[in-house]
Image: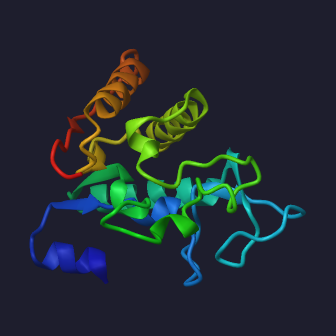
């Protein structure tokens, strides 16, 4: 019905927020980008914990299918790769408890459920961020109707520049290079 609404209103662009992509919730947002694995206990949402080194392919399959459906209707989509509002901050107290990068929600013991995820990520977290971005590029990077926004209002200038450089180098020798949006405002 949403695709039909876009068509009926002659709209040709949507902005895809990724806040829920890194936040598990009792409401059961699914799929998420990482696999849930048995044998490690439950995350704060009551489901099995996540392995941040294993992608959940169904998340990316759905991403691709939706991008293709939109492209078939002449609609462009901006994938916001990260969103600060899914992370703990003075403006969002308590949000970090369901963040996948909260150590109590993943089997890897990785803790970055606050804004350190953007402003001072460890080399391990930076590698996981780049792996996620690369997976998104592998998933929809061959399509003409997609482009990317690093993060909504992160304010993390050097981190955003590093993500932009990663995308540019990753796509440098591919048939398509995509527009990359930079959002300088916010926190």
Residue at 56 percent across and 68 percent down: it is 97
Relative to residue 162, is residue 100 depicted above or below? below
- On the picture, is 69 further left or further right than 127? left
Residue at 59 percent across and 67 percent down: it is 31
Q: Is residue 142 visible?
A: no
Which one is in front, 117 or 16? 117
Across and down, in percent, residue 24 comes to 57, 70
In this view, which residue lies farthest toward the right? 39
Colouring rule applied to residues: rainbow
Which one is in front, 112 or 14? 112
Relative to residue 83, is residue 4 depicted above or below? below
- On the picture, is 13 further left or further right than 115? left
Report which quarter residue 11 is drawn in: bottom left
Across and down, in percent, residue 112 comes to 54, 48
Across and down, in percent, residue 8 comes to 14, 79
Which one is in front, 35 or 89? 89
Q: Is residue 78 visible?
A: yes
In this view, which residue lies farthest toward the top? 173
Residue at 46 percent across and 57 percent down: it is 63
Q: How many marks can you see?
A: 0
In this view, which residue lies farthest toward the front? 90
Residue at 31 percent across and 84 percent down: it is 1
Across and down, in percent, residue 96 comes to 50, 64
- On the picture, is 158 further left or further right than 121? left
């Amino acid at each position: 019905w949403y695709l039909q609404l876009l068509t009926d209103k002659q709209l040709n662009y949507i902005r895809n927020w990724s806040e829920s992509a890194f936040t598990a919730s009792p409401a059961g947002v699914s799929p998420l980008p990482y696999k849930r694995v048995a044998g490690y206990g439950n995350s704060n949402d009551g489901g099995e914990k996540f392995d941040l080194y294993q992608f959940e392919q169904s998340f990316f399959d759905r991403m691709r299918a939706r991008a293709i459906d939109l492209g078939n209707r002449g609609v462009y989509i901006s994938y916001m790769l990260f969103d600060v509002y899914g992370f703990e901050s003075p403006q969002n107290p308590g949000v970090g408890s369901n963040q996948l990068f909260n150590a109590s929600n993943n089997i890897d013991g990785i803790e970055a459920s606050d804004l350190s995820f953007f402003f001072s990520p460890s080399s391990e977290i930076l590698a996981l961020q780049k792996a996620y971005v690369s997976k998104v590029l592998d998933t929809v990077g061959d399509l003409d109707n997609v482009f990317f926004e690093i993060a909504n209002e992160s304010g993390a200038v050097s981190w955003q520049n590093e993500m932009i450089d990663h995308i540019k180098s990753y796509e440098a020798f591919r048939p398509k290079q995509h527009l990359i949006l930079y959002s300088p405002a916010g926190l």
